[in-house]
Image: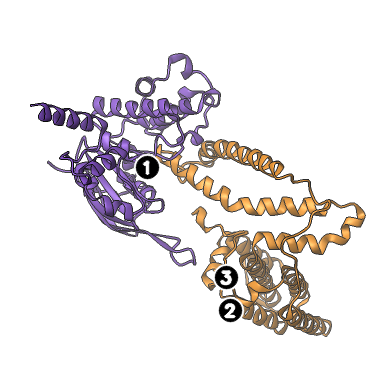
Amino acid sequence: MEPILSVKNLKYVYSAGTPFEHTALEDVSFSVNRGEFIGIIGHTGSGKSTLMQQLNGLLKPTSGSVILDGQDIWSDKKLTRQARFRVGLVFQYPEYQLFEETVYRDIAFGPKNMGLPAGEVDRRVREAAGFVGITDAQLQASPFDLSGGQKRRVAIAGVIAMEPEILILDEPTAGLDPSGRREILSNIAAYRKSKNATIMMVSHSMEDVARLTDRLLVLSGSRLAMDGTPDEIFAHTDELVNMGLNIPQVTQVFLHLRQMGLDVPGVYTIEQAVSALKNRKEAVHA
Amino acid sequence: MLKDITLGQYFPGNSPVHRLDPRTKLLALLAYIIALFCARSWIGYGLLLLLLLTAIRVSQIPGKAIVRGMKPLAMILVFTGILNLFFNREGKILFQVLGIVITSGGVQRAAFMVVRILMLVSGTFLLTYTTSPISLTDGLESLMSPLKRLHMPVHELSMMMCIALRFIPTLIEETDKIMSAQKARGADFENGSLMDRARALIPILVPLFISAFRRADELATAMECRCYQGGEGRTKMKLLHFHRGDLVTFALMAALVAAVLALGSFGM
């Protein structure tokens, strides 16, 4: 299958030619398949946010290329603009970019910029609001009257309304309470399912990425350090810890059990842990 | 593009210029500006340019950074140059076509004005590049302290300036972030009519103002939590002291300004 997005030998240097010059990305290459759910993890300053902004053409790579659906997004101005709409980008704390008088108009900002007819804009706004659980009454409210979690969901709806094939989110659950986190993560899953969209999510929660993603990209010191399934990645505990990262708590517990001599498999979600323990119990009693 | 704005930016370093007392640098800049306006000949400008280049060299600030800071000035420079070129009628006529007269006096004056603005701004940049906002306002407060007798709220003014300078980079960063976020939703700031472009600013300005007010509010709370009460009875952790370098700078500046003023009085 042709990958929907791939980057080749990406390099990006900030403030080139000043004392603040620093390389944020160095020789990063990977491909993304349609419908994948990818987690991006890495220590603060490892280049995650820079990488995200390369993928929808907000930052132009110093060298290397970003290929969307077989075409280099920097080969033509139109393609660069299209990349903005085909690759939706939700920044960290996106609620701080709300500006319109009503929630409806804020969500409609993206689709309107795409030049869609009014009927289509209306459909998309209502559908996007549906994905994030914003009611019709709330659509007419001012975004500044909503709670923090609701604002965040409105901001995400503003990107979802463009119906991007790839949705990239930078720590979408940062600073939210547990129920707010759960809601946002299930909103994202709902969007993915209904549009067969590709999701890329930056997160510091190893539990979340272990539970939700099919594949993990690990960034460290501006480079792509690892690329694999959560299973493969979390097997490298020491390396992750050296990069300032961690493994899910339940994985740590099971590693400890194994060091104590118990015959348990490596797990990285609670569900796996429960079934592993059940299996073991049955084996012991059999 | 916003990253190009270097106004009020500080380049950390440990050069002799960085180590000078902020008051010395402020007074030296003042003297330099006065001399710049009194200089009437290339000799005067040459002396001041030599001083400026030496100071930049000693400060280890890359020349590129100073040039980059000039970019926003390009329009003003071109404008000043053209105005002086066309409307000054002194000296020999060099060129005359369709009622447009260019004289030798005009050329000289245009060149002087452009050089003067360039030197003025680079001198000011050198001050903000080599002096952290905090020591800059400390210096200002100390220099303005005689005005306290006249009931000028000197401390409050310098605190306000300090906060304003401190927040320039923060707000630039914030603007950059908001712009990126709106661009990701297809906002277009570079194309369209003037009206379109003005309207395109709303999605940036509204979030920016909201965040500036939020920050101001948070800062006020944080200051109150630390019992901030203004200048009354407040002592300083870092006291300003003049050192040998400052004395040398004073002597040098005095000699130079005197030289330029003397040259000026002879019409040179």
Gap between marks 1 and 2 measured at Cα: 45 Å
Instruction: Estimate the x, y position of residue A201 in percent, counting from the top left.
Output: 32, 39
Residue A75 against residue B205 in the figure, above or below: below
- Mark 3 against mark 2, which lies toward the viewer? 3
Callout 2 secondary element? helix
Residue that numbered label 1 is attached to: A204
Residue that numbered label 2 is attached to: B57
Disc sitting over residue B13 in the figure: 3
Which chain's colour is purple? Answer: A
Gap between marks 3 and 1 measured at Cα: 35 Å
Q: Is residue A32 visible?
A: no
- Comparing B97 with A188, the one in front is A188
Q: Tag 1: residue type?
A: His
Q: Tag 3: residue type?
A: Gly
Residue furthest to the left in view is A286
- Mark 3 against mark 1, which lies toward the viewer? 1
Disc sitting over residue A20 in the figure: none
Chain of the residue displaying label 3: B
Q: Does B149 sit left or right of B85 as displayed?
A: right
Q: Residue at x 39, y 28 (%)?
A: A157
- Going from N to C along the chain, the mark reached first, 3 or 2, is 3
Q: Does B11 sit left or right of A162 as displayed?
A: right
- Comparing B207 with B113, the one in front is B207
Callout 1 secondary element? loop
What colour is chain B? orange
